[in-house]
Image (cartoon, rainbow, N blue to C red):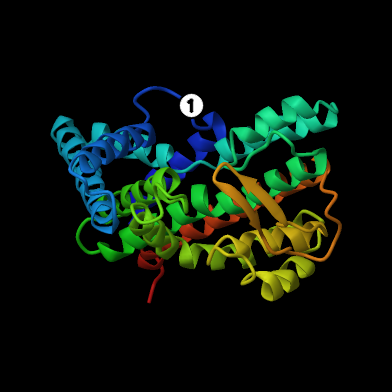
Amino acid sequence: MSEAALILGAAFALDLLLGDPTYRLHPVRCIGHTVCFLERQLRRMHLSGLLGGGLLVLLTLIVTLGVYLGFAEIARRCGGWVLWIWRVYLTTSCIALRDLIDHVRPVAAALRAEDLSRARTAVQRIVGRDTKRLGPAEVARATVETVAENFVDSFLSPLFWYIAGAVALRSIAPATGALAALVAYRTINTLDAMVGYRSERYLLFGRAAARLDDIMNFIPARLSVPLLSLSAGLCRQDGRGAWRVALRDRKKHVSPNAGHPESCLAGALHVRLGGPVTYPHGSVEKPWLGCGSDQVTAWHIDAACRIVLLAGGVAAGLVLLILMLPLITRGVPA
């Protein structure tokens, strides 16, 4: 367990320091290439419905976990330090707190400069909606929603599954279990991002990925409420309002998970999130979350980033404490 804690601590520090550099052989990009290849093969076999989507999930998981275990075995044979470096590298590649902040800050900067065209271009990189006609407040609102939702998808859920895997194999190989669970989560999350749409092409084919992603984010999304509420209070925002609005509005969202962090940040910042949204496949009338103003600004984006960064630090600290607990209690005299 202590090894799993050291790996996570090093990975978290590297993520905050370096972010998530973009390069061709990034593990998550490799997962994406695998999904594209397998989707093409399945569709060529006319497996484009529920069965094909289920096979896509199964085959992608087999490939990614097989590659992870294969590289881990090669690294182990090369020496303990090589294995440790490989595990830190992979963990860093699967958590993305700094990367989330790095992607939303250009939107806030463009809005402060009153450059709407640049703001639309920046927000288009992080949302799936049609951004061509968004006004400044709509751009900022989309960005805050993305910060909230991706805090769970990009950081809190990977953290949760890391510790879940470590605990599940705590008496055998906790570090191996932690990394396997982390890779499995990142695979499902990538599948959902690529095929989990409600468009005609993916309505059936992407259903298995979307449902599995909902299941794997279920607990982390609910854990985000106390974390974000606490962090909002520490950041001198409305922590009590975050908690109150989340309890009231979290189930209004069409997603079983996204409404929890979004309503929490809406309450903390005294804004309304949601409302009508236009996607490439059509328009969606989302329910409003929160009871403040819908005139979201760059200031709200910056405040959301501060809350999420602190919440991420608190979550990482708690996970490290839990992982180190056996070592700590071992040293306490009876």
- Image side of residue 288 versus residue 295, left or right: left
| Dot 1 crowding, Cα within 10 Å, few <14, some 14–19, many 20+ | few
Q: Residue furthest top?
A: 24
Residue at mark 1: 21
Q: How many marks?
A: 1
Image height of 104 relative to 53, above or below: above
Give 306 or 32, whichever is nearer the viewer.
Answer: 32
The residue under the point 73% across, 63% down is 288
- Image side of residue 248 versus residue 183, left or right: right
The residue under the point 85% across, 61% down is 292
Question: Which quadrant holds residue 16?
Answer: top right
Image height of 272 relative to 107, above or below: below
Q: Secondary structure at mark 1?
A: loop
The residue under the point 86% across, 57% down is 293
Identify the image quadrant of the C terminus: bottom left
Locate residue 70, reporting x and y percent: 16, 38
Which amino acid type corresponds to the residue marked 1 in the rendered image?
A: Pro
Locate residue 79, reporting x and y percent: 18, 33
Image height of 16 relative to 114, above or below: below
- Image side of residue 129 versus residue 212, left or right: right
Locate residue 34, reporting x and y percent: 28, 36
From where the camera sits, is residue 6 visible? no
The residue under the point 82% across, 66% down is 291
